[in-house]
Image (tube, rainbow, N blue to C red):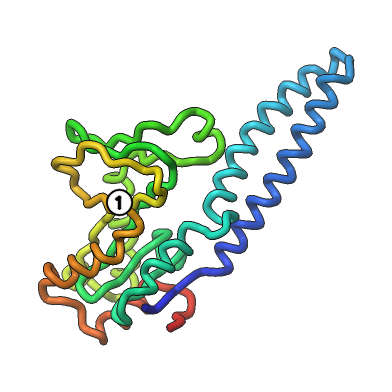
Amino acid sequence: MKLVINEKYIKKNKNIGKALFIITIVVLGISAYFAISGDMSKLLYAYAGMIAGISLTRVSMYFMNRFGREPRFDEYLTEVFGKLRHEYTFFSYATPVPYLLLGPCRLWLPILVTSSGTISFENGKWKHSGVGPFKRFMGQETMVNPEREVADASRDIHKQLAKMGIPSEEQPQLQPVVVLMLASNKVGELEGAPYPVVPLPELKRFIRREDRDNCGEGISKEFAEKLTEALSTVSVDS
């Protein structure tokens, strides 16, 4: 497998998360000082600081959950995809979407479920239950609307490829797949779900099977190289 990763982007956002965390601590500390100072004239500043601190906490946790954790979620994907053959290229923050896998038959779009809970598809709608308010506050994201996420990703990818000279009729199929990143994730009712739902340990086997059994015309080596160049803006490592 080839890997295309935007290290500068990841490092920048990791530093943003760290900086926001430090600022949050300072803001909350000042607010606490005003609150216990006994000076009623500063009580309003204490309340304002607490509100700002809570908001900053959520933002900083968002950045740290994506870019500051070790290993990052893209590193989990890299480990899984690293066992695929050389026909595959995994893009991490190097295309218009965070994660993208180019295979011999299609483009794979991983939609990550990074919070515990149960994933289901009922009455034409996706549901992610079991994520309480505290987990949301700590930066854990629920899977709200995968179909909108796919629509946005499809638009951005097609736009990028067209911009680089690959017309829509030549662009490969984009196949979304919902990936359960945590062992604690559970699966509910999925009848009629528009996208497959696959636990991370089974992802490699699922992709290999689909590309083997449902490939269609396939993507030539030459066209795959053209697609890689069109999609990415950073260097490709073997």
**Residue 189 appears in which quarter of the rendering?**
top left
If the image is split into quadrants, where does the N terminus sit?
A: bottom left
Amino acid at pointer 1:
Val
Left or right placement of residue 180 versus residue 68 in this view: left
In this rendering, the answer to whether 238 lies above or below 61 is below
Residue visible at 43% across and 83% down?
Answer: 238
**Can you identify the residue that label 1 sits on?**
178
Q: Position of residue 75 (x, y in %)?
A: 48, 64
Q: Position of residue 184 (x, y in %)?
A: 40, 43
Q: Where is residue 123 in the image (x, y as percent from the top left)?
A: 17, 31
Q: What element carries label 1?
A: strand
Front-lying residue, 101 or 160: 101
Front-lying residue, 145 or 119: 119
Residue visible at 35% across and 74% down?
Answer: 83
Residue visible at 80% across and 33% down?
Answer: 29
**Residue 57 appears in which quarter of the rendering?**
top right
Q: Position of residue 46 (x, y in %)?
A: 77, 23
